Amino acid sequence: MSIFDLFKQIESQTPTVTGPPEYIIAGLGNIGEKYQNTRHNAGFMMIDAFAEKHGAKFGKHQFKSNTAMAECGGVRCLLLKPDTFMNLSGQAVTEAMQFYQIPPEHVIVIYDDINLGVGELRIRKKGSDGGHNGMKNIIYLSGADNFPRIRVGIGQKPHPDYDLADWVLSAFSPAERDILAETANTVSEALALMVKDQTDLAMNRYNTGKQKKAKAPKSDAPAQQSEEGGTCS
């Protein structure tokens, strides 16, 4: 190996970040084989992909969760998949928050949204639970609603009379899983910005659907509406 190859190898090595996590990233879902690949487990699916991308392995059970530690852009992150089932997700999230003394602003929650088309995303800095029971429990037990969150579209019920529980616990089709695989890449890019306190940029780049449309700037002359794009660093 030449000295130039050695320099390249040293430059390519990223030092491991040690110490307590700066962020918690919680993907919500239900544990158990029968819930795998169901709509309500979109949060699990997204965080699994993020963990794989960053070489993190789930398997340590603490905080009523299956956990992993990941490094993203020099930021140490605790990844959580609550073992509590969806409606009691707050027990897991708040226990980890209290242990590491992490504020809500540094706790990112990923969960499903039936009001968005499959694979669409809505990123927000804070807000209500929107009728989602997992988020509702997190807000209730923490007493805060300023959690950054990524809502992943799972599609609306086929018709109004379709039972909601049956719908969210139904499996994604193969075609929908292909869409979600692409969505998972986008979520990972968004998370890379959010853990660097750039949630506004993540919202601008990655929100999809109707919510991404912005008001045209006021002007005396007609102006074309533009939207910034780009790739995550």
Image: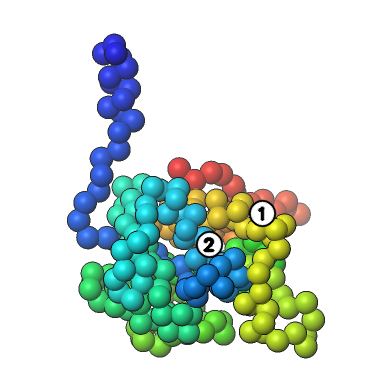
Residue at the image point whose x is 51% and y is 60% from the top:
46
Q: How far apart are marks 1 and 2 (CA)?
A: 12 Å
Question: Measured from the top left, where is residue 165 in percent x and y?
Answer: 63, 84
Q: Relative to the observer, which residue lies in front, 130 or 82?
A: 82
Q: Is mark 1 on a helix, strand or loop?
A: helix
Q: Work out whether 162 lies above or below 27.
A: below
Q: What residue type is labelled 2?
A: Met
Question: Measured from the top left, where is residue 10 in percent x and y?
Answer: 27, 27
Residue at the image point whose x is 70% and y is 86% from the top:
163
The coloring applied to the image is rainbow
Q: Relative to the observer, which residue lies in front, 175 or 15?
A: 175
Q: Residue furthest left?
A: 19
Question: Measured from the top left, where is residue 162 in percent x and y?
Answer: 75, 85
Q: Work out whether 54 lies above or below 141.
A: above
Q: Relative to the observer, which residue lies in front, 188 or 37?
A: 37
Residue at the image point whose x is 32% and y is 17% from the top:
5
The crowding category of the residue bearing disc 2, from other C-alpha atoms within 10 Å (few below 14, some 14 to 19, many at least 20), is many
Counting labels gives: 2
- Dividing the image into 4 quarters, which one contains the C terminus? top left
Q: Residue furthest top?
A: 2
Residue 121 sits in quarter:
bottom right
Give me the disc on residue 76: none
Give me the disc on residue 45: 2
Q: Which amino acid does label 1 sit on?
A: Asp
Q: What element carries label 2?
A: helix
In this figure, which residue is indicated by the disc labeled 1? 178
